[in-house]
Image: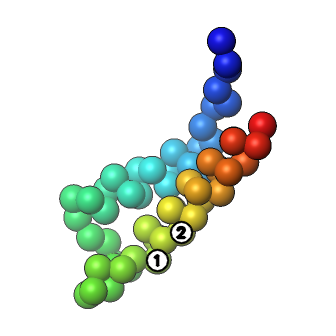
């Protein structure tokens, strides 16, 4: 069986940010719906997935 690496804490926090923004907006959210925290969280998750897939 292939052993999956443990999800880093910052990636877990990024997932929490994405989950939280599906229900409510934060003070950083723009009126058009764009949020820098969501953009950063998505980038962190994508970067971790790329690193994980290389291993």
Instruction: Work out whether residue 51 or residue 14 is closer to the camera in this orientation and state it.
Output: 51
Decide: is 28 above or below 52: below
38 on left or right of 10: left
- In the rendered image, the residue lying farthest to the right is 55
Describe the colour scheme in one phrase.
rainbow
Q: Which residue is mark 2?
A: 40
14 on left or right of 35: right
Q: Are marks 2 and 1 in contact (CB under 8 Å)?
A: yes
x and y percentages locating residue 33 in the rendered image: 29, 79
**Mark 2: secondary structure:** helix
Q: Quadrant of the C terminus?
A: top right
Q: CA distance from mark 2 to mark 1?
A: 6 Å
Decide: is 20 above or below 39: above
- Count neighbours of disc 1 (C-alpha within 10 A) and say few if under 14, some if 14 to 19, many if 20 or more: few
Q: Residue at x 62, y 48 (%)?
A: 49
Q: Quadrant of the N terminus?
A: top right
- In the rendered image, the residue lying farthest to the bottom is 31
- In the rendered image, the residue lying farthest to the left is 23
x and y percentages locating residue 29 in the rendered image: 33, 79
36 on left or right of 5: left
Instruction: Work out whether residue 3 or residue 25 is closer to the camera in this orientation and state it.
Output: 3
Decide: is 48 above or below 4: below
Q: Which residue is mark 1?
A: 36
Q: Residue at x 50, y 62 (%)?
A: 42
**Mark 1: secondary structure:** helix
- Count neighbours of disc 2 (C-alpha within 10 A) and say few if under 14, some if 14 to 19, many if 20 or more: few
Q: In the picture, residue 35 is in which quadrant? A: bottom left
x and y percentages locating residue 25 in the rendered image: 26, 70
x and y percentages locating residue 4 in the rendered image: 64, 26
Q: In the picture, residue 32 is in which quadrant? A: bottom left
């Amino acid at each position: 069986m292939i052993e999956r690496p443990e999800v880093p804490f910052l990636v877990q926090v990024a997932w929490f940010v994405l989950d939280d923004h599906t229900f409510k907006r934060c003070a950083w959210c723009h009126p058009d719906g764009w949020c820098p925290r969501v953009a950063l969280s998505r980038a962190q998750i994508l970067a971790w997935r790329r690193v994980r897939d290389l291993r």
